[in-house]
Image (cartoon, rainbow, N blue to C red):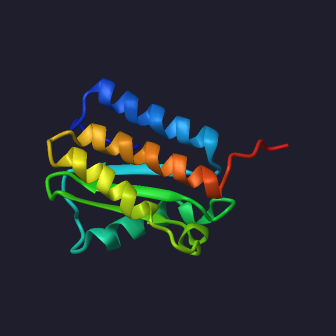
Amino acid sequence: MAAKPHFNKLEEQLMIAAIEKASKVSSSEIHVFIESNCPADDSYDRAVDLFDEQDLQDVENRNGVLIYMALLDRQFVIVGGEAINELKNLSFWDDTKTEMINHFKIGKMAKGLTAGIEHAGEKLSGFFPFKKKP
């Protein structure tokens, strides 16, 4: 996680714990990238570039996830791998975003990120359950 000092240690630990919990129930790989400002003209383009840079398109089941935030720009994007994007009737991204935004609106940025990670992991587990490697 590329967290700047926007979050305290406890908040960072809660986000890391949420990622670890998600990795125990789903084969999806969730990454979070946080920066103050988006250096690109478009936050979606920045998120896609980071998704590629972190090789999330190469996750074994093509089900990687990147949650990108530009805090001072008040922007966030969730990018999913090809296998996730191929799912039909996929409303859980909207549900995940809504969950996050509800916390962001009251100034709870870390809680929003943690809730988004937990929600994504839980929902992805239904499509991509965790499998022990032989």
Q: In the current view of this chain or complex, which residue is farthest to the top? A: 10
Relative to residue 62, is residue 39 drawn left or right? left
Name the image quarter holding the N terminus: top left
Q: Residue at x 69, y 59 (%)?
A: 60
Mark count: 0
Whether residue 28 is visible: no
Q: Residue at x 37, y 63 (%)?
A: 94
Q: Nearer the viewer, residue 90 or 64?
A: 90
Q: Nearer the viewer, residue 32 or 18?
A: 18
The image quadrant that residue 40 belongs to is bottom left
The image quadrant that residue 64 belongs to is bottom right
Q: In the current view of this chain or complex, which residue is farthest to the right? A: 134
Whether residue 48 is visible: yes
Q: Is residue 102 above or below residue 18?
A: below
Q: Residue at x 54, y 35 (%)?
A: 21
Name the image quarter holding the C terminus: top right
Relative to residue 27, is residue 80 drawn left or right? left
Q: Residue at x 58, y 75 (%)?
A: 86
